[in-house]
Image (cartoon, rainbow, N blue to C red):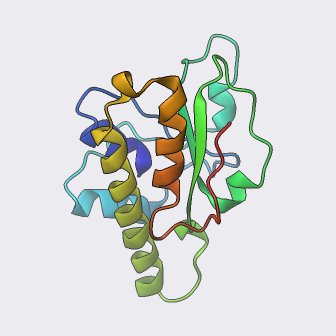
Amino acid sequence: MAEVLLNHLGKGRFRAFSAGSYPRGVVHPLALETLRRNHLPIDRLRSKSWDEFAQPGAQQLDFVFTVCDRAAQESCPVWPGQPMSAHWGIEDPAVVEGSDLDKERAFVTAFRYLKSRISLLTSLPVTSLGRLALPSKLQEIGRMDGSTAKSAKVA
């Protein structure tokens, strides 16, 4: 969902990719449904491993945001180009158990938090903030309401 939101809200200023430490091989159907309900494109989405972006010759990244708490506790790859990174803790909706309504509600909640944070990111004057001020702004976004992280991490 973050990939689609950043590509949409960034209006060409960002090119986002979403990947995970243990991809399931398919995009979660409730993630697709949540995006569809919000009139966002779902074509070209695929399940990806973050290893794709740590390989020599991979797409160079400027930022890496972990949003799932499980990913924040794992050792991340060494990213080529040393992008800025931060943890924006959001409960993983894919692991929610319960009724179909509970699961759907988890995806809607995650979408809302992601949209709020990504909207803040896209409103930042990224080029004028520079590499010294930008990390603190990214940390602030990670500590927004709904964060599951006690404090955001920036590498």
| Coordinates of residue 121 in the picture (x, y in percent) | 37, 43
| Coordinates of residue 88 in the picture (x, y in percent) | 54, 54
Rendered view: 88 above or below 110: above
54 or 126, nearer to the observer: 126
- Residue 111 seen in the current view: yes
Looking at the rendering, in which quadrant would you find the C terminus?
top right
Horizontal placement of 7 versus 84: left or right?
left
At 40% from the left and 28% from the top, the residue drawn is 129
Rendered view: 129 above or below 68: above
| Coordinates of residue 82 in the picture (x, y in percent) | 65, 22
37 or 13, nearer to the observer: 13
| Coordinates of residue 103 in the picture (x, y in percent) | 47, 78
At 26% from the left and 45% from the top, the residue drawn is 41
At 63% from the left and 64% from the top, the residue drawn is 149
Horizontal placement of 140 versus 56: left or right?
left
135 or 3, nearer to the observer: 135
Examine the image and state in which quarter residue 10 appears: top left
127 or 4, nearer to the observer: 127
Rendered view: 15 above or below 93: above
At 42% from the left and 48% from the top, the residue drawn is 2
Residue lying furthest bottom in this view?
Answer: 99
Residue lying furthest front in this view?
Answer: 133
Examine the image and state in which quarter residue 75 appears: top right
Residue lying furthest top in this view?
Answer: 57
